Amino acid sequence: MSRSVHSNNKIENNVHNRINSFSGVLLTSGFMLVFLGTLLFLFALYPKYYILLTREDALFESLTAVFYFAAGIIFLFRGILLFKRKRRIQQSLFPLLFGLLFLFIFFEETSWCSRIFNFSSPEIIKQINEQQEINLHNLKLFSGKHSMFSFKRYFNPNTILSMLGLFLGALLPLFAFFAVRVRKIANKIHFPVIPVAFIPIFVFGFFYAFILSRLFGENTHHEIKEFMFAFGFFLFSLSFLFNKINLPGEK
């Protein structure tokens, strides 16, 4: 083995150990506290600028779309490479599904690119969509503007995204980290698991939006949660792309 290859493997191992360690969790938590603390400072003293950053089609929503698009492309790219190399769908199935999922969320975030290319929605879409846009998550079917016991209030795209983010970004990584059996099952079915160092991104993002929306009733706080989920999934895709140890079964 050449010296350069040995050096690259050593760097990969160090990165893998850091993002799958308690010290990595502490480091990410520190960054999240600084980031969210800055946002709270802005919200408390300069709410006008905070809203400018977090409203629809502003900075954070645009970055959310970019991160989901990048994560989707990366997972599809890696999944296709795995299939070409192994010729076995088992090892590439979940990466491909992740890629399709993240691209689907990207298209939903951009109203299937109508916001990017600035084309209007058909009249039939306007009649059934809360925001008159070409997407599924704003359909009147999913509107939560009902009583607190309404089924639609809890079974809506925002709730589903929160549950998905907390499961993939927090619960599953914790179980895989502490429970050997869960980790073995994930390895056996070639299911990529988010490194534990990224857990704070999802947890802090969820509770930031949950607490502030309950206290102040500002819907723009949810844009921060969606941004942090997208950023976490983007980092997940990068770790899957570059970290060979993060690819179960690949030799």
Image (spheres, helix red, strand yellow):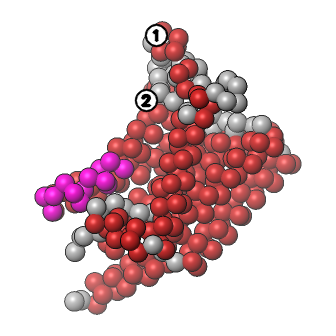
Which residue is under mark 1? 124
Q: Which corner quadrant of the image does residue 138 belong to?
A: top right
Secondary element type, mark 2: loop
- If the image is split into quadrants, where does the N terminus sit? bottom left
Which residue occupies 75% across, 37% down? 218
Query: Which kind of residue does numbered mark 2 sit on?
Result: Trp
Q: Which residues are magenta?
A: 86-98
Q: Position of residue 140 (x, y in %)?
A: 56, 20
- From the image, tell me which residue sits under label 2: 112
- Residue drawn 29% across and 50% down? 96
Tag 1: amino acid: Ile
Q: Which mark is residue 108?
A: none
- Reply yes or no: does residue 212 show up in magenta: no
Q: Residues within 10 Å of mark 1 (few under 14, many from 20)?
A: few
- Crowding at mark 2 (Cα within 10 Å: few <14, some 14-19, many 20+): some
**Mark nearer the viewer, 2 or 1:** 1
Q: Is residue 220 above or below residue 6?
A: above
Q: Is residue 165 left or right of residue 211?
A: left
Q: Are marks 2 and 1 in contact (CB under 8 Å)?
A: no
Secondary structure type for disc 1 = helix
Residue furthest left in the image: 87
Front in this rendered view, residue 124 or 248: 248
Identify which residue, 109 or 20, lies in the foreground. Answer: 20
Q: Is residue 39 left or right of residue 13?
A: right
User: x, y percentage for residue 215?
Assistant: 81, 43
Check the image and name the residue furthest to the front.
149
